[in-house]
Structures are given as structure tokens and as C-alpha cells.
Image (spheres, grey):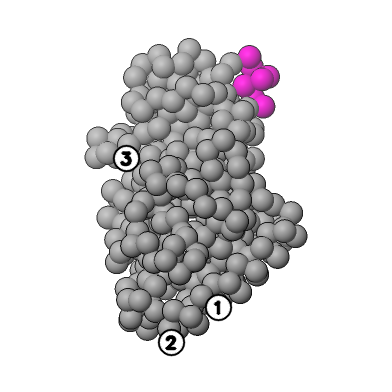
Amino acid sequence: METFYEAQPGLLKESAIALGFFDGVHPGHQVVIGKAVEEAKRLGVKPGVVTFRDHPRTLTRGASPLLLTVIEQRLELFAALGVEAALVLSFTEDLCKLSPKEYVEEILAGAMGARSISVGFNHHFGRDREGDPDLLRKLGERLGFCVHVSEMVYVDGREVSSSQIREQILAGELELAAELLSRPYAVPGVVVHGEGRGRKIGFPTANLGPSDVQLIPRRGVYAGVTHLAGGRALKSVINVGYRPTFTGITTSNAPAQVATSPAPQTNGGCVVVKPAPQPLVEVHILDFDEDLYGQRITVDFLKYLRSEKKFDGVEALKRQIAQDSDDARAYTSQSISCTSYS
């Protein structure tokens, strides 16, 4: 897939494009992107996506939701859906100043050669989000592209939205989040050096260094699957937290991973990007003892097993980790999904 990071005239001669931030690339997003791919085949042009590297609210409001998918994940998911070209824009002040008309003329038509544009029902664009699907249709009549607007998508009667998925992840409802995403919730990162305590007590861990802007599930222990380079998918138990047995940091005094604004019960759990330091993500891969330092891995969070606890000593902790490993092994053995698209 061709990927462009600057809108220049004539990047593509002709295309059918999907517009959106597409955080999560959930079924609602897949419908929009799928329509662009379908239109590209009908018109004999290249299927594309126009998206943003960072959430637009980072600039417009000074804070934005922690992401379900960082840009590298989204690009891989776009390609898996049949997209052949992506324009990844940085949400700068200059871009913010473009009127809807200028945005369409310079970027969608001028840079991407759009002949068909697909958007979601609530898509807005241009300065102060003044543009909407109706304006896009009017501009299309003059600039020579058609517009397709997708409706809200539901899974088992539940509205599919990025904010709804964030809420489920923060609540520990990973199985429901996977249904709404159409795949397990996945966090990629590079394996970094830790303090080596896990290996000393017989349970070596890979310490994940995820992106600072990606949402990490709530503190606790999870059953999951770790994806290594080359396609290996290995059963794992994942700990998210602050290692209270060693650090003394407990649930009551741990720094909050996220802040909500103003209240998660009423606004979809808007999670902002300026939280306290994120908790540690430590992965114990079952029946595995290879050196992964410096390697990029992806961890699927499949099921929340228990909350993080402070134990009276190392032996009590070891017994609990052994039980967690058994629970994770049992769950992943019966799980129908040990793969991810990230």
C-alpha cells in the first residue's frame, strides 16, 4: 500500500476514497472503507483512505481520547481491507484553517483525484468542522465526484463506536470490546528491559513499551495472546499495573491512567491524552523462554482474569502467578480467536 504523509497536487490521478480518523477500524469504519473499495472497482480507480496521524481533538481541544489503534495498526488494517493508497495528514494549525471548500478542492480532489468519497453519517471536515455530508455532495456536483454516506452500525443491538469500545476496555469487558471491534483488542510495542524480577521468581516477562497515546486496559491480570515476528501466536498471561508487592503502589494510591471529561457515564468516557504515567504492561508467555529484547510484538487482551493485588510475600505471588497461568492457558485453549489484525 502506498502511504503519503503530505498532501501535494496529483498524488493520485483518480481514486475512490474513504474519509475519517477510523480509530479502531471497527465494523462501522469497515463499512465506509469497504464502500470506497467497492467504488474503486466499479470506477476502475485506486481505492484510498484519507486519515490523520493524531486525533484532531489534540489541536482543537488540547486533549483527545487515548487511541484504540495507533497509525501503524490502522495502516495495516486498511491494507487488509483492500486499500491501496493512504494519505496520512498531520492535524496542523494550517490544516485547521482550511475551509471545507478548500479542504475538498486542495486535498480530496487536488491531491487524491477523488471520483468517489465515502464517509460516515456523522463525518465533519474543514475549519471548525463546518463541512458535513450534505456540503460534500454539493461540492461533488461541481468537482465531479459522488458521495456515499454510511449509517450507524450495530452489533447484537449495540451501537458500534470508538467511545463505546473504550468504555468496555476500561471496564475490563474485553470480550464485549472484541465483539464491537470484530477482533481482540491489541496493543503493539517494543520489548524493553525491566528489573528482571519475573525471571528471578521463575516467571520471565516481556516488558512492553507501548505508545504513550494508546489506551491500556484497566489495571489487572488478563488472558491473552502474544504475536511475534514471523506469525507465531503464543498463549500469555498479561499484568497491567504497578507491581504493588514490590513497589507498595496499590489501587488506592496508584496514579490514574486516564482522566475523564467531564463524566464517563454521560459523554462516552472521553479519555484524554494528558494522564499520569501509564501502568506497566508485563507479558508472561507460557512455555516460552526466548530473548525478545528490542523486538516489536503485539499483545491481544482476551479476558480480564482478576484485579491487581499486593501479596504478603514472593511465595504467595508465585502461587498466584501459577494460577493465573493455568487460567490463561485454559481460556486461550478454548478461545475461538487467537489471532489479530494488528
CA distance separating discs 2 and 3: 49 Å
Q: Which residue carries the number 3 mark? A: 91
How far apart are the alpha carbons under marks 1 and 3?
49 Å
Q: Main secondary structure of the magenta part?
A: helix
User: In the rendered structure, which disc, 1 or 2, sits on the residue that comes first in sequence?
Assistant: 2
Q: Nearer the viewer, mark 2 or mark 3?
A: 2
Q: Is 270 situated left or right of 174 in this image?
A: left
Q: Is residue 306 left or right of residue 21?
A: right
Q: Which segment did they paint magenta? A: 38-44
Dot 2 amino acid type? Asp
Badges 2 and 3: C-beta atoms under 8 Å apart?
no
Q: Residue at x 52, y 60 (%)?
A: 284
Nearer-N-terminus badge (2/3) = 3
Compared across the picture, whether 141 is left or right of 5 comes to right
**Residue 11 visible in this rendered orientation of the protein:** yes
In the displayed structure, would residue 9 be above or below residue 4?
above
In the image, is residue 214 above or below residue 141?
below
Tag 1 residue:
319
- Amino acid type, callout 3: Phe
Q: Which residue is mark 2?
A: 312
Which of 35 and 87 lies nearest the eye of the viewer? 87
Asked whether 220 falls inside the magenta stretch, the response is no
